[in-house]
Image: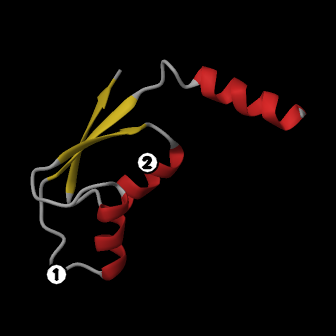
């Protein structure tokens, strides 16, 4: 039961969290399979497509791996 309470606290804390607006600006063609998969995992499928993701360490790490292919803006 105590595990459920801690999850609820995290959800409440994320309501005012920052959001990252990520845009695919360069094609992943010619780059490694892992980088292509990272772009897809971010939710990007087409050139100049923009998605909004929560600002978490996981998303930041994924963006760092493909920083040469995307542009990132912080939105509140």
Q: In this view, does 29 lie above or below 63?
A: below
Residue furthest to the right in view is 1
Q: Quadrant of the C terminus?
A: top left
| Image location (x, y in percent) of residue 47 | 10, 58
What kind of element bears circle 1? loop
State which quadrant residue 28 falls in.
Answer: bottom left
Residue lying at 43% horizontally and 48% vertically, measured from the top left? 60
Q: In this view, does 65 lie above or below 31?
A: above
| Image location (x, y in percent) of residue 53 | 37, 40
Q: How is the image coloured?
A: secondary structure
Q: In this view, does 75 lie above or below 56?
A: above
Q: How crowded is mark 1: few (under 14 residues within 10 Å), some or many (20 or more)?
A: few
Q: Name the residue under label 2.
A: 60
Q: Mark 1 points at which residue?
A: 30
Residue lying at 89% horizontally and 32% vertically, measured from the top left? 2
| Image location (x, y in percent) of residue 5 | 80, 28
Front position in the image: 44 or 31: 44
| Image location (x, y in percent) of residue 66 | 30, 61
Residue lying at 16% horizontally and 81% vertically, measured from the top left? 30
Distance between mark 1 and mark 2 Cα atoms: 23 Å
Q: Is residue 64 above or below residue 55?
A: below
What kind of element bears circle 2? helix
């Amino acid at each position: 039961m105590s595990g459920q309470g801690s999850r609820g606290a995290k959800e409440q804390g994320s309501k005012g969290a920052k959001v990252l607006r990520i845009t695919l600006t360069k094609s992943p063609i010619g780059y490694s399979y892992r980088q292509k998969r990272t772009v897809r995992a971010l939710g990007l499928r087409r050139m100049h497509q923009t998605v909004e993701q929560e600002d978490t360490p996981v998303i930041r790490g994924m963006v760092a791996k493909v920083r040469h292919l995307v542009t990132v803006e912080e939105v509140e």
